[in-house]
Image (cartoon, rainbow, N blue to C red):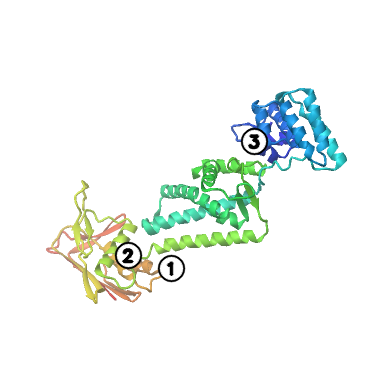
Amino acid sequence: MLIKEIESLSGMDRGNIRFYEREGLLTTKRLENGYRDYSEEDLQVLLRIKLLRSLHISLDEIKLLIKGSKDLSETLSEQIEKLETEKNNASYAQKVCRAIKEEKTTFSNLDATQYLDRIRDEEKESNSSYFSTTGDLLPSQVFYPWRRFFARMTDLFLCRIIWTAILGLVFHVNLSSRSNTGQLIDSMIAVFILLFLEPLWLHLFGSSLGKAIFGLRIEYGEDRRLTYQEGLVRTWGVVSRGLGLNIPVYNIVRLWKSYIFCREKEVQPWDEYISYTIKDTKWYRGAIFVGIYAALFFVSIIIHSAQLLPPNRGDLTASEFVENYNYYAKYNGIDFGNQYLNENGVWVEKEFDGTVYIIIGYSESPDFVFNVENGFVKDVSFEIEVKDNQDRIGAYETQMTLASYAFIGAQKEVSLFSNALRRIADHISNNKFQSYRFTEAGVEVVCDIEFSGYNGLYTDFTSEWLIPDEDARENHYRLTFTMTK
């Protein structure tokens, strides 16, 4: 039978029943769906426990009786003596103890029902709570599935933002181009961050951000907060069985089953012996939830926007410009093959690692020239000149864009929510083989392009190339790019 049935048949609250389970007086098995399965024998044991507790026999004594370590008659004799000092209905309790003793039965054969009926009649007649077992009760549990769900989602969102900040601001992973697989991994990592953070919150505060919003509190009993280890065990139950480790589809199944448990006022497996309380259910808590969620979402936007700013800001040294340049290259997933830009702005070859790069068309990495005043860069430039070369020529759009980001992005006028970098990209992208000039954040950008002996453009997917004219006797291409603060 399920707990609802055994509650009805025993006349006991489920808090009583689970209290005796926690104390080791009753051992039940679980069905595959997670529900407890109580047998007829379990019911009889509960009734015997209820009877003996009504007679004020201690839990330790009952444990000995269940184990068979002590005789029921001996226990009753000792209890009759103890009741001599008690008042109120102690005399009636003595009377019941003697009646059971005279029966000369054992704990396992005791028919508790007849004596419980007598006690019930006595309670009605005397209007006394002497025989009550309400003190044998597990801590209170609240069953508000949606409040608990939204509290959990808030905590998960907070952990996701923590991981997003680490990913974006420490490891410089491009968050805006994160793949579906990457996002799935991120959500699972957020769950594991929750696994270790929530026990700390519960230990220190008895709650978490999400739970505090809804006035929810978790403690061990009514007198102390969970230890970190107790919290860790509980949160692992939540993460593995409640959230299904955030594994797609499986997590929905686990969430649904947890919802059904909560809706039917079944204690979740990870909450069995703790106190789960709620302060109130006032309307403003929903408003606070919306406000906090909006704030967390705004923080997420700030983290994404912060990635668009370079690591070095303000006046730059040459090496800081290079660091900014390489930062944007990594952020945008740009690989320069077997070369890298060193701190002096010069392209040097990497150590050979077995990778072979195939270069299509003419490719000359531009060396940057810095005009430095008082240790800081005043302007940056590079020049490309090609004569009588039959290879097609690229637009150098990538180098100009990264250089502009590195220099202009460092200026104080470029803020978190500035569109300066987008405007820079548009200027350069729309003038791949044309001269242009623009000013952004106090930096003037000038690009002069001239060429001859080329007969048009060739496009392959994302790149455009100048194609040499086979009939031309000679060709020439020259690009000068300058940024001046």
| Crowding near the residue tagged with mark 3, few <14, some 14–19, many ≥20 C-alpha atoms within 10 Å | some
Left or right: 331 with respect to 199?
Answer: left
Q: Element at badge 2?
A: helix
The picture quadrant where one finds residue 81 is top right
Q: Element at badge 1?
A: loop
- Residue designated by label 2: 429
Marks 2 and 3, the one that precedes in the sequence: 3
Left or right: 382 with respect to 145?
Answer: left
- Residue designated by label 1: 417
- In the rendered image, is residue 209 in sight? yes
Q: Give the foreground label among 2 and 3.
A: 3
Q: Element at badge 3?
A: helix
The picture quadrant where one finds residue 404 is bottom left
In space, the residues marked 3 and 1 are separated at their CA atoms by 58 Å
Q: Nearer the viewer, residue 17 or 72?
A: 72
Instruction: Give residue 227's position: percent from left, percent from top.
Output: 54, 48
Q: Amino acid at mark 1?
A: Phe
Left or right: 400 with respect to 112?
Answer: left
Instruction: Give residue 257's position: percent from left, percent from top.
Output: 60, 40
Q: Amino acid at mark 3?
A: Glu
Q: Give the foreground label among 1 and 2.
A: 1
In space, the residues marked 2 and 3 are separated at their CA atoms by 71 Å
Q: Residue at x 35, y 74 (%)?
A: 441
Is 31 rendered above or below residue 485? above
Is 297 rendered above or below residue 256? below
Marks 3 and 1, the one that precedes in the sequence: 3
Q: Amino acid at mark 2?
A: Ser
- Residue designated by label 3: 21
Instruction: Give residue 377's position: percent from left, percent from top.
Output: 26, 73
